[in-house]
Amino acid sequence: MIFVNDKKSLGSKSFTEDVFASVKPMIANDIDADWLEENVDEVEFFSDLDLTDLSVDDFNLLLTAVESADDIDSHWKGILLTAMQADPRFEKQAEVA
């Protein structure tokens, strides 16, 4: 299950594993190392991905990685992105003209 924040969680075991496997290579060098290490174990053993403690910057980095991932089920990806964009940490990126 993916815990977006204290009020919103979603997804199945396989979806959580797919999301993490897809975004991990994109975020590994830029996201908080302690968070990454902790969540590697959480996903491996419990299939849980906890976004609740991510900083604003790391949350938005992860959101961008999810947006660009092309190997995640598109229906569930849309649901996850909607939940992440409703989170107060979401920072809308400026439109490029």
Image (spheres, grey):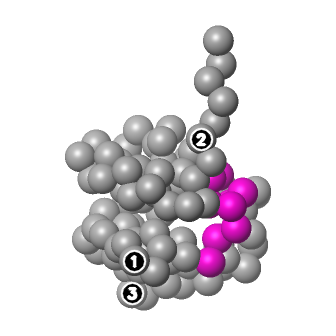
Residue 73 position, x and y percent, is 28, 48
Q: CA distance from mark 2 to mark 3?
A: 31 Å
| Image quadrant containing the C terminus | top right
Q: Nearer the viewer, residue 55 or 32?
A: 55
Which residue is painted at 31% across and 69% down in the image? 10
Compared to residue 62, the image places residue 54 above or below, namely: below
Q: Are marks 3 and 1 in contact (CB under 8 Å)?
A: no
Compared to residue 52, the image places residue 81 above or below, namely: above
Q: Nearer the viewer, mark 3 or mark 1?
A: 1
Helix or strand or loop: what does disc 1 sit on?
A: loop
Q: Earlier in the sequence, mark 3 or mark 1?
A: 1
Residue 70 position, x and y percent, is 41, 38
Q: Amino acid at mark 2?
A: Lys
Helix or strand or loop: what does disc 2 sit on?
A: loop
* Residue 49 shows in this picture: no
Q: Earlier in the sequence, mark 2 or mark 3?
A: 3
| Image quadrant containing the N terminus | bottom left
Q: Amino acid at mark 3?
A: Phe
Q: Earlier in the sequence, mark 2 or mark 1?
A: 1
Q: Nearer the viewer, mark 2 or mark 3?
A: 2
Q: Residues within 10 Å of mark 3 (few under 14, many from 20)?
A: few
Q: Are marks 2 and 3 in contact (CB under 8 Å)?
A: no
Tag 1 residue: 7
> Among all residues in the image, which is located at the extreme top?
97
Q: Which residues are drawn in magenta?
A: 53-61
Q: CA distance from mark 3 to mark 1?
A: 20 Å
Q: Amino acid at mark 1?
A: Lys
Tag 3 residue: 46
Tag 2 residue: 92
